[in-house]
Amino acid sequence: MLTHSFKGNVHLVLVLALLIGTTVGAQLGASSTRKAGGPVRFGFGCLAFVGVTMVAVKLYLKMFHG
């Protein structure tokens, strides 16, 4: 990965923008879910569980059926 960057294949301005955006977004998301309370936090938990389950099923199907 480091050689990929040294060859000039990484756009550092975009990397910096992504790092700043994810940091700010994570902080805003954490503070908003803390203030929102139980039902919203439960919904986010269910959404994360569904996402992980979908990735696991897709990986299983790719490994054993295709």
Image: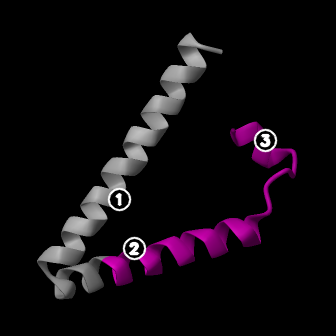
**3 and 2 marks in contact (CB < 8 Å):** no
Residue 56: quadrant of the picture: top left
Instruction: Please identify, in this view, whether the residue under mark 1 or under mark 2 is nearer the observer.
Output: 1
Question: Which structural element holds mark 1?
Answer: helix
Residue 27: quadrant of the picture: bottom left
Q: Which residue is at a point 67% across and 65% down the rendered structure image?
A: 15
Q: Residue furthest top?
A: 64
Residue at numbered disc 3 = 4
Q: Tag 1: residue type?
A: Leu
Q: Residue 46 appears at what percent x and percent y?
A: 28, 57
Residue 16 part of the magenta-drawn span: yes
Q: Tag 2: residue type?
A: Ala
Q: Tag 3: residue type?
A: His
Q: Residue 36 appears at what percent x and percent y?
A: 20, 86
Q: Could you classify mark 3 by the number of other residues whose Cα lies within 10 Å: few (under 14), some (14-19), or many (20 or more)?
A: few
Residue 22 part of the magenta-drawn span: yes
The numbered dot on residue 47 is 1
Residue 19: quadrant of the picture: bottom right
Q: Residue 3 appears at what percent x and percent y?
A: 77, 38
Disc on the earlier residue, 3 or 2: 3
Instruction: Please identify, in this view, whether the residue under mark 3 or under mark 2 is nearer the observer.
Output: 2
Vertical placement of residue 51 versus 21, above or below? above
The numbered dot on residue 26 is 2
Disc on the earlier residue, 1 or 2: 2
Instruction: Please identify, in this view, whether the residue under mark 1 or under mark 3 is nearer the observer.
Output: 1
Between the C-alphas of marks 1 and 2, the distance is: 16 Å
